[in-house]
Image: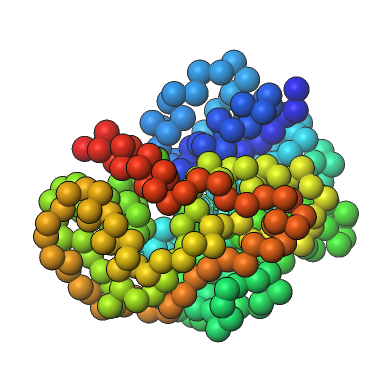
Amino acid sequence: MKKVLVAGGAGFIGSHLCEFLLSKGCHVTCVDNFITGQKKNIAGIKSPNFKFVEADITQSGSWSEGQFEEIYNLASPASPIDFEKIPLKILECSSLGHRNLLELARKNDARILFASTSEVYGDPEVHPQRESYFGNVNTVGIRGCYDEAKRFGEALSMAYHRQFGTKIRLIRIFNTYGPRMRETDGRIIPNFFMQGLNGESLTIYGEGQQTRSFCYVADMCEGMYALVQSEETRPVNIGNPTELTVLEMAETVKKLTGNTKPFAYKPLPENDPKMRRPDIARAKDVLKWQPRVSLEQGLDATLKYFKSQL
Ligand SMILES: NC(=O)c1ccc[n+]([C@@H]2O[C@H](COP(=O)([O-])OP(=O)(O)OC[C@H]3O[C@@H](n4cnc5c(N)ncnc54)[C@H](O)[C@@H]3O)[C@@H](O)[C@H]2O)c1
């Protein structure tokens, strides 16, 4: 039985990944400090092959002495609300925290996946975004703490790979959605669903003409797993290339939730990306991966979840 560590496993994507890895027959140790994760996300995991350790990856502890064959590092706050509230924690996760995990991977000769992000492309001047694009990031802007942390995490991973031969895997995750997103997370999907279901106006930033591409969480877990099983050490975009304007998504969620209020328009936040769509040619070619869950199916499952949380 393969021994796997999931850092950030009590979060939205992490909790789905823990379940996915258990279904693949792995022994899963989940480390999380609940800074943005939720106990309820992992409360339903009853498998004897699942172990939870409450710990902060920026500090060493008993978890950092375990034996693992694969390490998935998802531990980082990821919502724009967190960029304002806890920027130092965000910077520490992908620097100190990721270095602790890289050390563990080096000692264990384990594969280690770093959950990077489409945010490394910043407000992109290239569309769709392919991995060879270096990005357009404002280091001193409000999103800088997150974007630069993830860029540093990629660079740190590469340094371990070059210096010690560590088996790194770099996934650039594009907007992912599904059940277990925090209701008060501030990200577009929970915002729209909670406002829609509570009978409030859906908030549109700017005119809503900015685009996003939404990947269902089950497809994301498949992509992460496929990347770790592969020999690919270059960054790989994982996301759904179906692109929508924010206004189109708002209209869809408004209809799904039966909301009748007019939209509330607010100014666009600083450095908000104007367009976002992954070029997934590398994932298709190297991993034979592509998303399978349609937007309709994904939004339906997400609607059921948010309804159950009211
Ligand atoms: N959801 C997306 O659309 C998206 C897009 C791009 C990248 N990502 C990345 O994927 C990962 C998971 O994102 P998510 O949406 O599930 O966010 P999330 O906030 O739900 O999950 C992050 C988890 O990490 C934990 N964590 C944070 N700092 C920690 C620390 N120092 N020690 C231990 N645990 C810690 C949190 O408590 C939480 O459970 C993040 O690294 C994020 O940057 C997500």
Q: Is residue 287 left or right of residue 95?
A: right
x 75%, y 33%: residue? 68
Q: Is residue 223 above or below residue 210?
A: above
Q: How is the image coloured?
A: rainbow
Image-quadrant location for residue 283: bottom right
Front residue of this view, candidates 279 and 199: 279
Q: Is residue 27 above or below residue 211?
A: above
Q: Residue furthest bottom?
A: 125
Give residue 134's position: percent from left, percent from top: 66, 78
x 38%, y 79%: residue? 270
Give residue 24's position: percent from left, percent from top: 67, 28
x 47%, y 42%: residue? 11
Q: How many marks?
A: 0
**Residue 94 visible in image:** no
Give residue 121's position: percent from left, percent from top: 58, 73
x 23%, y 65%: residue? 203
Quadrant where the C terminus sits is top left
Q: Is residue 124 left or right of residue 43?
A: right
Q: Is residue 65 above or below residue 242?
A: above
**Residue 212 visible in image:** yes
Front residue of this view, candidates 208 and 154: 208
Q: Residue furthest top?
A: 48
Give residue 242's position: percent from left, percent from top: 49, 62
Quadrant where the N terminus sits is top right
Front residue of this view, candidates 151 and 291: 291
